[in-house]
Amino acid sequence: MYDRTIAELSSALSRRECSSVELTQATLAAIEQASGLNAFITITAEQALAEAEAADARRADGEAGPLTGVPIAHKDIFCTEGVRTSCGSRMLDTFVPPYDAFVVEQLRAAGAVMVGKTNMDEFAMGSSNETSWYGPARNPWDPTTVPGGSSGGSAAAVAARLVPAATGTDTGGSIRQPAALTGISGLKPTYGRISRYGMIAFASSLDQAGPMATTAEDLALMLGAMAGFDERDSTCVDQSVPNYHGLLAEHGLKGLRIGLPREYFNTEGVDPEVASAIETAVAAMEAAGAQLKEISLPNTELAVPVYYVIAPAEASSNLSRFDGVRYGHRCSDPVDLEDLYKRSRGEGFGEEVKRRIMVGTYALSAGYYDAYYLKAQQVRRMIRDDFARAFDEVDVIAGPTAPTTAFGLGAKADDPVQMYLSDIFTIAVNLAGLPALSIPAGFGGGKPIGLQLIGNYFDEARLLGAAHGYQQITDWHMQRPSLEG
Amino acid sequence: MSIDAAEVAKIAHLARLAVTEADGETHARNLSSILAFVERLSEVDTSGVEPLAHPLEMTQRLRRDVVSEVDQRERFQALAPATADGHYLVPRVIE
């Protein structure tokens, strides 16, 4: 029963076919059985059952919304009052936040039941979930491969149908790339669409929270609950939240103008199986009434270099708060204040995090600022302007989410630049602040392939409608891995 | 731009990160390859292009300069590794 979509569970709950307590118990048992995936860092069984009981009471009182009583999981980057929030790092291994993140508050208010906190790359820095202090989460389609990252635990949990939906965050592709690699749907909303209050910061001009689920319909239900204005995040945008779920049918594929950037197709480094699946997907959308148009995003190749200046620079500043004094890991027996800072941070952070802090420190240091950070911000504008020109002619932009299917554990661990290139199609979207989603669009060698759709600012409803339209004519999103042992 | 172990030590000091000598070599190699990778930005003609700091080019909201938080010192200090009498404890700074 537990392994259904939110829409299905919601209607089962409202027809009293099961209670939220029963559903939550089944979910917790499934998570336990799939512990080999290492999808969760913390399981909150007791709290979940209490929340489920409260949800059942709400339903009995006739006060239920679509998410009331539905089990979900939160990426361990969102602060949860009274529940350890590690961000995948030894630095925060014992950190128990004194407050809830906005997203956590919103989903709780909607009645969703949190069953646990999911695994992730340390401080969201990674594309494979291998930088987690708690060990890598595994891809349910093939446990010898990675689930992608950084929201790898959320992706693995949803792909294995342990929970119908989970939260994620996306700074350079951290929702969309793992969604693609595990065969689920994931949405990165417009920058500022969802308050980041209580979401541990990585790169503040890029970070955005979003939902991960099996269908576009469920993404719409989740986004409707997660989005909203909150004055505690000075970068979130005060715009009304449309009824994303209600608008699904209004924005179909018929008449949709889809741009196909020539830089995303026939590109070196894209698996032939990925390229052919995306071409088939696009052809199916055309057959359903969409209009295809070749476009150009000429600065595509520069997105990854720009990102690897801007994101580390912002990270080096954001992560300076971890000082061993106020919260987080503190080294033992520091001899002086400098020793306290250096060893607490040296012991608390893993290699990839240290690497990025150092790249950022270097890029921002005197004498290098103009050559790196300022230059990267200039090229960032050029990349954004490419998209603005494209959206004069088309409604959405389509292409592969990731250049390959899931790669093996350890395959790219020793080569940071190769790892960074797995985000080549997702990163530009964060630089421009646009919304984009990834949906399942086929298989290569038995491993899922993701189709990315990029939309204009605050055009999530159109993106979700297009994805929903595609899922009405295909069944890739319904394929599920067979779990053994 | 190539970075050597001595340079890594300097950057690590600026970032207040303890890095062992052995790790210093690995970091030097990785940082060099990352910097070589981003180096291609220097070839791009950006004359006359305004730097973009915020994707939506919005300015941050301001609020009135009044107290908006209640005092929760005890709650927050409960998270700290070492406190006494409402203070955070660090090694002696002034002799």
Image: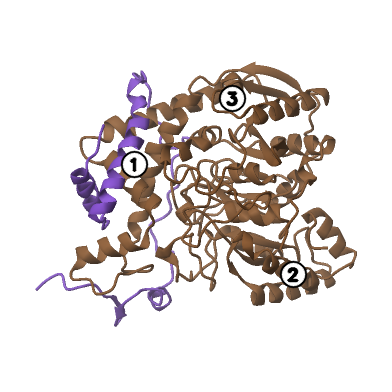
Chain colours: A brown, B purple
Disc 1 crowd, CA 10 A, few/some/many (<14, 14-19, 20+): many
Q: Is residue A381 above or below residue A179?
A: above
> What chain does badge 1 belong to?
B
Give the residue number, with chain letter if any, for mark 2.
Answer: A24
Residue drawn at 44 percent across, 44 percent down: B60
Check disc 1 and report its element: helix, strand or loop.
Answer: helix
- Whether callout 2 and callout 3 share a subunit is answered yes
The image position of residue A222, as x and y in percent, is 69, 52
- The quarter of the picture where residue B33 lies is top left
Disc 2 crowd, CA 10 A, few/some/many (<14, 14-19, 20+): many
Amino acid type at circle 3 is Tyr
> What chain does badge 2 belong to?
A
Q: Nearer the viewer, residue A444 or A206?
A: A444
Give the residue number, with chain letter if any, for mark 3.
Answer: A264
Amino acid type at circle 1 is Asn
Where the C terminus of chain A falls, by quadrant? bottom right
Which mark's residue is nearer the viewer, 2 or 1? Answer: 1
Residue drawn at 50 percent across, 28 percent down: A384
Q: CA distance from mark 2 to mark 3?
A: 42 Å
Disc 3 crowd, CA 10 A, few/some/many (<14, 14-19, 20+): many
- The quarter of the picture where residue A190 lies is top right
Give the residue number, with chain letter if any, for mark 1.
Answer: B30
Amino acid type at circle 2 is Thr
Residue drawn at 68 percent across, 69 percent down: A32
Where the N terminus of chain A falls, by quadrant? bottom right
The image position of residue A47, as x and y in percent, is 65, 75
